[in-house]
């Protein structure tokens, strides 16, 4: 079992910045990829950014140039640096990880979410 715990969500004014963190713990063997998703009220969950085991990153178009995803493999931690925040970035942000255990079994894990609110 792997546990994911997000932190860093807050209320911030438009144009502000936040850094989200996701710490993984438990029986960690290998993360194939990790990512951040978000879900705004009344909307479907949306993929925001991913980083794979080779540290290659992808972003949804709406956050390109403003958000940066990164991983510290030694600390089993993933980050999302969010700059130039907009009200439309308001959502519950979830950490996601595709984990492969020592037996080659793949499983996807989710964190509980951290709230980001962008408002003046």
Image (cartoon, rainbow, N blue to C red):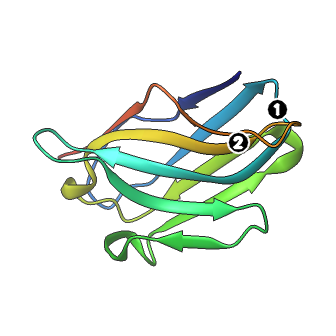
The answer to whether 71 appears left or right of 86 in the picture is: right
Q: Which mark is residue 28?
A: 1
Q: Residue most toward the left?
A: 42
The answer to whether 120 appears left or right of 66 in the picture is: left
Q: Quadrant of residue 14?
A: bottom left
Residue drawn at x 64%, y 62% as measured from the top left: 51
Per the model, the C-alpha gap separating discs 1 and 2 is 8 Å
Q: Residues within 10 Å of mark 1 (few under 14, many from 20)?
A: some
Quadrant of the image containing the N terminus: top right
- For residue 65, above or below residue 70: below
Q: Residues within 10 Å of mark 2 (few under 14, many from 20)?
A: many
Name the foreground residue: 88 vs 4.
4
The tag earlier along the polypeptide, 1 or 2, is: 1
Q: Which mark is residue 94?
A: none
Name the foreground residue: 59 vs 30.
30
Residue 95 appears at what percent x and percent y? 52, 40
Residue drawn at x 74%, y 67% as measured from the top left: 55
Residue drawn at x 54%, y 31% as measured from the top left: 6
- For residue 3, above or below residue 86: above
Q: Are marks 1 and 2 in contact (CB under 8 Å)?
A: yes
- For residue 11, above or below residue 98: above
The answer to whether 87 appears left or right of 53 in the picture is: left
Q: Secondary structure at mark 2?
A: strand
Q: Quadrant of residue 102?
A: top right
Q: What is the total number of numbered labels drawn onto the structure image?
A: 2
Q: Secondary structure at mark 1?
A: loop
Residue 87 appears at what percent x and percent y? 20, 54
Residue 26 appears at what percent x and percent y? 78, 21
Q: Quadrant of residue 57?
A: bottom right
Q: Which mark is residue 99?
A: 2
Residue 94 appears at what percent x and percent y? 44, 39
């Amino acid at each position: 079992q792997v546990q994911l715990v997000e932190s860093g969500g807050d209320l911030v004014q438009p144009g502000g910045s936040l850094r989200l963190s996701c710490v993984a713990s438990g029986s960690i063997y290998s993360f194939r990829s990790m990512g951040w998703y978000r879900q705004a009220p009344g909307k479907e969950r949306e993929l925001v950014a991913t980083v794979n085991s080779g540290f290659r990153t992808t972003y949804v178009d709406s956050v390109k140039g403003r958000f940066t995803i990164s991983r510290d493999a030694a600390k089993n931690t993933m980050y999302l640096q969010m700059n130039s925040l907009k009200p439309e970035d308001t959502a519950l942000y979830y950490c996601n990880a595709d984990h492969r255990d020592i037996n080659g079994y793949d499983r996807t894990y989710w964190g509980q979410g951290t709230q980001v609110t962008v408002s003046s």
